[in-house]
Image: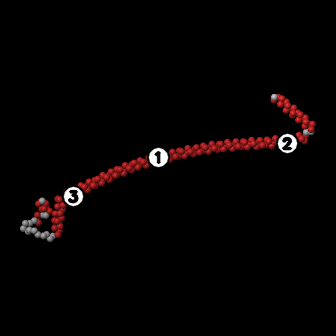
Amino acid sequence: MRNLIFFVIPFHFWLPAEGFKLNTNLLETNLINLGVVLGLLVYFGKGVLNNLLDKRKQTILSTIRDAEERYKEATDKLKQAQIRLQQAELKANEIRVNGLSEMEKEKQDLINIADEDSKRLEDSKNATIRFEEQRAIEQVRQQVSRLALERASEVLNNCLNSELHSRMIDYHIGLLKTMGSTTE
């Protein structure tokens, strides 16, 4: 302890004959006081200061470790999110491709159905036209037959006399009798 005091307060201030007196030099007094206070703080406060610094060091180290762990977790989560994003993009592309192929298939099916409907309508139209042609032809035949009968009846009425008329009736009756006997 004595060496410490000599270190803080130089020896030339401790002259034996002069005794104890006040130092009025402010610059020297403050330096001495500061030296004494710092010396005492270092000597007695070394353990407390070391404990405080160790605690601060441990706090900083644990904060750094926590930050590194959070960084690793965030990096892992980012990688997982990127993987999920890639999977989602692949799934979206797959759905889009499937949708396009389904759309093409549906389009082709609709075209085929429309073609079949068109063919059925064409066949129906042609059948209706043939039916109407047959009906028109039949009507024309009936009219021609009726007109021919009317004309023939008119010609016969004008050209036939009663004797020719009775001979013709007898002839046709004879034909009908021979036809009736051959069928039996």
Quadrant containing the N terminus is bottom left
**Which residue is rendered at x = 81% and y = 41% of the image?**
145
The quadrant the C terminus occupies is top right
Name which residue type carries label 1.
Answer: Lys
User: How many neighbours does mark 3 have within 10 angstroms: few (below 14), some (14-19), or many (20 or more)?
Assistant: few
Q: In front here: 63 or 168?
A: 168
Specify whether 50 is left or right of 81: left
Residue type at mark 2 is Glu
Provide residue 179's location: percent of width, then percent of height: 83, 31
**Crowding at mark 1 (Cα within 10 Å: few <14, some 14-19, many 20+):** few
Q: Secondary structure at mark 1?
A: helix
- At mark 2, the secondary structure is helix
The mark nearer the N terminus, 3 or 1, is 3
Q: Residue at x 38, y 50 (%)?
A: 77
Q: Nearer the viewer, residue 14 or 49?
A: 49
| Nearest to N terminus: mark 2 or mark 1 | 1
Q: CA distance from mark 3 to mark 1?
A: 62 Å
Q: Residue 151 appears at what percent x and percent y?
A: 86, 42
Q: Assess disc 2: are there few (<14), some (14-19) or many (≥20) residues with their C-alpha within 10 Å of its C-alpha.
A: few
Residue 91: image tag: 1
Disc number lying in front (2 or 1): 2
Element on which disc 3 rests? helix
Tag 3 near tag 1, CB within 8 Å: no
Q: Which residue is mark 2?
A: 150
Quarter of the figure with residue 132: top right
Three-letter residue code for mark 3: Leu
Query: Where residue 150 sits: x, y (%)?
Result: 85, 42
Q: Which residue is found at the position 19% from the left and 59% from the top?
A: 45
Q: Which residue is mark 3?
A: 49
Whichever of callouts 3 and 2 sits on the residue coming sooner in the sequence is 3
